Amino acid sequence: MARPVRRIVTGHRADGRSVIVSDSAAPNVHVVPGTPGLAGTVVWVADKTPADIAQQEETAPADRKLAIEPPRGGNVLRIAEFPPDNLYSREELDKFRRGIGSPEAFDTKARHFFFHKTHTLDYAIVLEGEIWAMLDEGETLMRPGDILIQRGTNHAWSNRSDRICRVAFVLIDAEHE
């Protein structure tokens, strides 16, 4: 079960005054059965850039299915929870890859089962725990407060600890070949 992510959304009243529109758990949560602790919460989605800040509709309702990448020309804020590597079920990972609609993003022949590549500029911010950011060549340990700028590279996340690691990701659609 994913720990709820408190999401506070602001907006405007009809008279233009700023208000808190909602303050509750983000509703779009995807838990991977069979792999305890593997979960993702989509906090917000902008379907285009520049973002429409005048609209008041929910952009990440519970039933909105998203691929690993944001909408073309948009961005997504996601909180991911990574369990220790030894808890992953290979069968469930295969289902997860198919379920997000981007199985081709994953490199199943790489040195770690989570290697993947997206056509995005990503900001990865470790909130809790620790995780190894792995590239084709090299890796580095990230701890709370560390930020990785991922620019469309083949990469993986490896949790070699004994507890869940929580990471905030901002994925921004990017130009690519």
Image (spheres, rainbow, N blue to C red):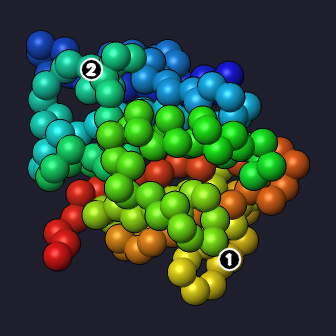
Precedes in sequence: disc 2 or disc 1:
2
Q: Identify which amino acid the numbered label 1 is placed on.
A: Thr
Q: Is residue 14 left or right of residue 117?
A: left
Image quadrant where one finds the C terminus: bottom left
For residue 157, say whether it is visible.
no
Q: Is residue 93 left or right of residue 106?
A: right
In the rendered structure, which amino acid carries the disc numbered 2?
Answer: Glu
Q: Choose between 124 and 65: the one closer to the eye.
A: 65
Closer to the camera in the image, 101 or 60:
101
Residue 78 rendering spot, x and y as whole percentages: 45, 41
Residue at screen point 52% across, 61% down: 108
Q: Secondary structure at mark 2?
A: loop
Q: Residue at x 16, y 50 (%)?
A: 72
Q: Residue at x 50, y 37 (%)?
A: 96
Q: Is residue 149 above or below residue 162?
A: below
SS class of the residue under badge 1? strand
Q: Which residue is mark 2?
A: 58
Q: Which residue is mark 1?
A: 140
What x and y, as percent, mark residue 68?
Answer: 37, 46
The quadrant in which residue 166 appears is top right
**Toward which corner of the image does residue 111 lie, by quadrant?**
bottom right
Marks 2/1: CA–CA distance = 36 Å
Number of numbered markers: 2
> Residue 162 at x, y = what percent?
87, 49
Q: Is residue 53 left or right of residue 112?
A: left
Figure check: 175 above or below 167: below
In the depicted structure, whether residue 19 falls above or below residue 87: above
Q: Is residue 33 visible?
A: yes
Residue 36 occupies quadrant: top right
Q: What crowding class fits label 2: few (fewer than 14 Cα within 10 Å), some (14-19), or many (20 or more)?
A: few
Residue found 83% across the figure and 45% down from its top = 163
